[in-house]
Image (spheres, rainbow, N blue to C red):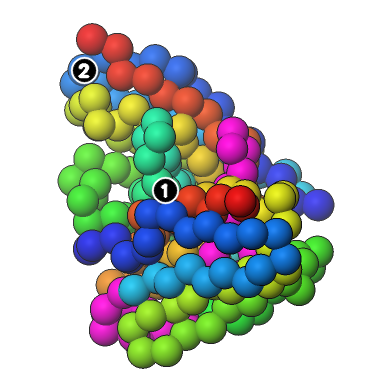
């Protein structure tokens, strides 16, 4: 079955770039849509962005200037970079399959917590 | 884009039915039948329970159902059980080809 798993540093400093990777198993990263979603502590879900067909992307307008999503087809992974991190970027970051034609996220990773460290 | 609007909390007794509303705009819910709902139990990963307004993924209880009217989508939980206590989030595709979530609703089983 399809599985996704996030990895990356748990701590980031002001103005640094946060880099996270999602490893996909059971499906090809070259097919379909793959997303990042985040959840600040005690708050709701926020869609960050998606990539599809290995290169086309779309981002949350509120994050667009600081966010990049890319793929590594050789390792079947996709990555998230968030530039110039601020305290509000502290969250659990999930990678997920979707939205695709259904508009839904059907497979989620366990999530990786990222904390802003001053 | 603004978050979809959900009530902060809804409660009910075991066996009752409850509904959670999710209100958007003409740019999202009003235009597309691409509304999904997620259940997130405390400390757990969100789980897809409804997609395309009314469809249930394999393995999801028939007690969960979805509907839409105009700019508002709804999730109904029938025969409320203790295990349904969780946070519920709606999500919609938008005209900008982006996605937007609701703020979440905490369901309490009395």
Asked whether, in this view, residue B8 is left or right of residue A109, the answer is left
Query: Which residue is labeled 1 in the image?
Result: A45
| Residue A93 coordinates in the image, percent (x, y) | 46, 36
Q: Is disc 2 in contact with disc 1, using a CB cutoff of under 8 Å?
A: no
User: Taking A74 as reference, is A60 above or below it?
Assistant: below
Mark 2 or mark 1: which comes first in sequence? 2
Q: Magenta part of the protein: which range? A: B24-51
Q: Residue at x 37, y 61 (%)?
A: B7
Pointer 2: what residue? A14
Name the residue at 23% across, 10% down.
A118
Q: Nearer the viewer, residue B88 or B96?
A: B88
Judged from the image, the secondary structure of the residue bearing numbered disc 1 is: loop
Residue at horizontal 46 percent and vertical 64 percent from the top: B90
* Residue A20, magenta (yes or no): no
Which image quarter: residue B95?
A: bottom left
Residue B57 image point, x, y percent = 72, 69
Of residue B84 and residue B88, the one placed in the foreground of this image is B84
Q: Please, is residue A4 above or below residue B84 in the view?
A: above
Residue A42 at x, y percent in the picture: 40, 34
Q: Looking at the image, is mark 2 or mark 1 nearer the viewer? A: 1
């Amino acid at each position: 079955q399809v599985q996704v798993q996030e990895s990356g540093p748990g701590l980031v400093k002001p103005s640094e770039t946060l880099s996270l990777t999602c490893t996909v198993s059971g499906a090809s990263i070259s097919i379909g849509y793959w997303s990042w979603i985040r959840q600040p502590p005690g708050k709701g879900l926020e869609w960050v962005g998606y990539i599809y067909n290995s290169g086309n992307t779309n981002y949350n307008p509120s994050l667009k200037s600081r966010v990049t999503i890319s793929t590594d087809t050789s390792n079947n992974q996709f990555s998230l970079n968030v530039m110039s991190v601020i305290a509000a970027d502290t969250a659990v970051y999930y990678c997920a399959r979707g939205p695709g034609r259904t508009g839904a996220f059907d497979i989620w990773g366990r999530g990786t917590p990222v904390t802003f460290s001053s | 884009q603004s978050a979809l609007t959900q009530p902060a909390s809804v409660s009910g007794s075991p066996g009752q039915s409850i509904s959670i509303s999710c209100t958007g705009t003409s740019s999202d819910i009003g235009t597309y039948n691409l509304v999904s709902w997620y259940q997130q139990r405390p400390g757990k990963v969100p789980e897809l329970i409804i997609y395309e307004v009314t469809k249930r993924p394999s393995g999801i209880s028939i007690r969960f159902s979805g509907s839409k009217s105009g700019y508002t989508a709804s999730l109904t939980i029938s025969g409320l059980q203790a295990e349904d206590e969780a946070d519920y989030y709606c999500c919609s595709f938008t005209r900008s080809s982006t996605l937007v979530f609701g703020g979440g609703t905490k369901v309490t089983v009395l």
